Image (tube, rainbow, N blue to C red):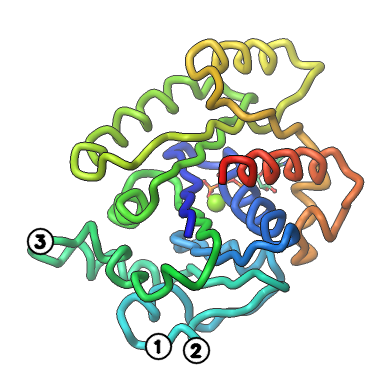
Amino acid sequence: MKRIAIALSKGGVGKTTTAVNLADGLARSGKSVLMLDLDTQGQVAKALGIKANIGLAEFITGEASFEDSSIQARQNLWVLAGGRSMAGLKRLITRKDYGGEQTLTEGLKALDQKFDYAILDTAPGWDSLTVNALFYVEDVLAPVSLEVMTLQGLMDFSQSMSSIQKYHPDLTLKYILPTFFDRRVKKSAEILQQLESYFGERVCPPIRYNVRLSEAPGYGQTIFEYANNSPGAQDYQTLTERILNDE
Ligand SMILES: Nc1ncnc2c1ncn2[C@@H]1O[C@H](COP(=O)(O)OP(=O)(O)OP(=O)(O)O)[C@@H](O)[C@H]1O
Ligand SMILES: [Mg+2]
């Protein structure tokens, strides 16, 4: 199973949008995908139009089986939802004397052979749940908004990641995904160029600013369902293919 965390400390850069649409893109291409929502906001389930009473927290603590805590949201796509109960899991992790950072990895071990991909949506900031996600995955995809100067944020995040890489050397900041790209805005192109000069091949083709992407979650649909001919759908299809090519 390939494990990819969508992460960046900065809020509102397109993490959830990317997690949901990439997961659906992979599922549509025939891969079996497990989505894990580590955010207390619980937006993954909402974006997919499903209602989850329990989810990832209950599965990790052993309160519920995978069958009871997961939801099959689409063909090939399963979700272990986030939400308020993730706060309880966070407390449980921080109370452990040692090994707290491996809580997620240990709890998910039984699922290793069941899916082609695990896609993790993480919360903004840097907390014990993010640290757990980074111990669990090998690859990180960091969305970077081109609307604001986030290069420093990305550098800081990559610095924080290196403290984990000491214990988990396979962890890599593999993909940098420019988001909110607007050709008409000069700054947008400038930041993109800067990203490419620092990070080279790791920078994926950008996701354009597209209002359809912000409307789709309100209908509980992915961009491929809501507006399959939109620029947003095209861009997330390109991303999906990039990830599939790295298999
Ligand atoms: N390319 C895009 N074009 C237009 N709107 C977008 C785009 N990507 C995301 N959005 C919208 O921007 C807002 C923030 O996106 P999203 O929730 O994916 O960010 P996030 O990084 O997950 O935020 P948080 O850090 O709060 O979890 C949402 O309303 C979303 O619908
Ligand atoms: Mg989010």
Residue 244, relative to residue 194: is it above or below?
Answer: below
- The amino acid type found where label 2 is placed reads Asp
- The amino acid type found where label 1 is placed reads Ala
Pinpoint residue 95: horizontal percent, then vertical percent.
15, 66
Q: Secondary structure at mark 1?
A: loop
Q: Secondary structure at mark 3?
A: loop
Q: Secondary structure at mark 2?
A: helix
The residue that label 3 is drawn on is: 98
Residue 83, relative to residue 152: is it above or below?
Answer: below
Spatial separation of the CA atoms under disc 3 and disc 1: 24 Å
Outermost residue, right direction? 229
Pinpoint residue 132: horizontal percent, then vertical percent.
31, 56
Spatial separation of the CA atoms under disc 1 and disc 2: 6 Å
Residue drawn at x 42%, y 39% as measured from the top left = 9
Tag of residue 68: 2
Using the rendered view, name the quadrant where residue 179 is placed: top right
Q: Earlier in the sequence, mark 3 or mark 1?
A: 1
Local packing at callout 2 (Cα closer than 10 Å; few below 14, some 14-19, many 20+) is some
- The amino acid type found where label 3 is placed reads Tyr
Residue drawn at x 36%, y 30% as measured from the top left = 158
Answer with left or right where residue 105 lies relative to residue 5: left
Using the rendered view, name the quadrant where residue 105 is placed: bottom left
Pinpoint residue 118: horizontal percent, then vertical percent.
50, 60
Tag of residue 64: 1
Do the residues bearing badges 1 and 2 touch, measured as CB atoms within 8 Å?
Answer: yes
Do the residues bearing badges 3 and 1 touch, measured as CB atoms within 8 Å?
Answer: no
Local packing at callout 3 (Cα closer than 10 Å; few below 14, some 14-19, many 20+) is few
